[in-house]
Image: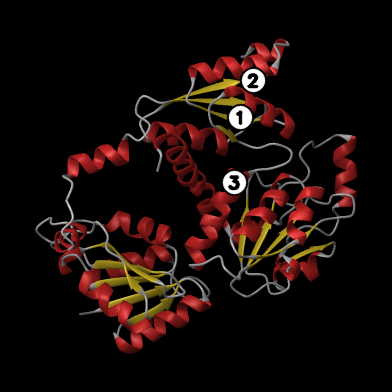
Amino acid sequence: MTRAYLAFTEKGLALAQKLAGALPGTVDRCGHGGPGLADWAAEQFAHADALIFVGAVGIAVRAIAPHCRSKAVDPAVVVLDECGHFAVPILSGHLGGANDLVRALAAVCGAVPVITTATDANGVFAVDEWARHQNCAVLEPERIKLVSGALLAGKTVALMFSKASTRTRTSFEVGVYQLGGLGNYMNAATELQSGRGEPLKDTARVLGRYYDCVVWRTYRQCDLEEFAELAGVPVINGLTDYAHPCQVLADLMTIRERRGTLEGQKLCFIGDGCSMANSLIVGGLLAGMRVTCVCPEGYRPAADVLMFAHKYGEKFHLLTDPAEGVKDADVVVTSAWNTAPGTPESERRLRDFAGFQVTSRLMEGAKPDAMLLHCLPAHRGEEISTAVFEEHADEIFDEAENRLHVQKAVLAILLAGL
């Protein structure tokens, strides 16, 4: 069997080399002088029996998708997280379910061989074989599709926006549709009577009688909380001046997808201590990360968030020097801090945030394989340089894509009881 290993980080490369020592094959690292992802996938699909990605399952799926033809000729494809915790077959190929390969790889590094819905050459699901051995009932494929594809069938979701949105609006619209529900977008400022003075409490009590859930992007956190108290249905924060929880769920998913774990990773946020900073501090600490927040004087995170972070002791630091903050960071995060160009407020912020741009020189202080995330939209030349943005574009747009996935999960939990 000819095997080809591809890693994305130094840690992943070390694991790939360990695996190749026991199960021989070629070992490459994506970028950093190594092959590009698309070229590597095309080459190995044509010549190898098995492709083993170490890290980044989402990237692996997208890389192989253009080359899949049939089980008779395709190679097997397996993904391991870079910490070696799990080994997962994502394409069975001509090896069948690829489960023997997964078990062999898992035995080398102590990973858990994960049973998936990969099938063998006869179309038998590996998970079905496992279930039968465990005396479990096996669902027919049609029933599986019904469960996964129509979780929100008959459900309605109000998408209420008081400010502009690209990712939050579209990802919720697409997510509700993909789950079989109906999502209605409404501009709260121009399309609802609330824009003409109808009390917020009346709007909440009306929409709560029509809809099963409300997503609201607005300004004041207190307005969102009042709405949620009165609506009588789940209300999801689509962004307030205080918090951006859906974005941070996507950030954490992206980090875990690429790093294999959140525990112990150092996250450094550089920018305005408002919604993104507040949510990253809370989310990062709850997930077991070490969090450093770097803000200019006068732009600190919310007081209650800092009180929460204080309980985590040395796992949290609030600084004003970006160079000190990024030292040995595994993940650097920034966001726009100049949201009203051409105004006196903008001019003041340009002065106050001088030296807070994430540049290539600043990133040299982080770990060599550090990730860079940005919630978008990005103001190149202000909070981030064009060079740094483009160098980390794959990470940033994976982060944007993951908004869709985490929000579908939130909707499924709230409305389908998962």
Q: At label 3, which amino acid type do we have?
A: Gln
Residue 89 visible (yes or no)? yes
Q: Nearer the viewer, mark 2 or mark 1?
A: 1
Q: Quadrant of residue 44?
A: bottom left
Labels 2 & 1 near each other (Cβ < 8 A): yes
Query: Is residue 190 at least partly visible in the picture?
Result: no
Decide if residue 379 is on the left or right side of residue 185: right
**CB contact under 8 Å: marks 3 and 2:** no
Earlier-in-chain disc, 1 versus 3: 1
**Residue at (40%, 84%) from the top-left corner?**
17
Q: Which residue is mark 1?
A: 216
Q: Is 121 on the left-hand or right-hand side of 63?
A: left
Residue position marked by numbered label 3 in the rendering:
247
How far apart are the alpha carbons under marks 3 and 2? 21 Å
Percent x, y for residue 272? 78, 49
Residue sitting nearer the eye, 231 or 124? 231
Q: What residue is shown with label 2?
A: 188
Say what secondary structure mark 3 lies in: helix
Q: Residue at x 75, y 52 (%)?
A: 383
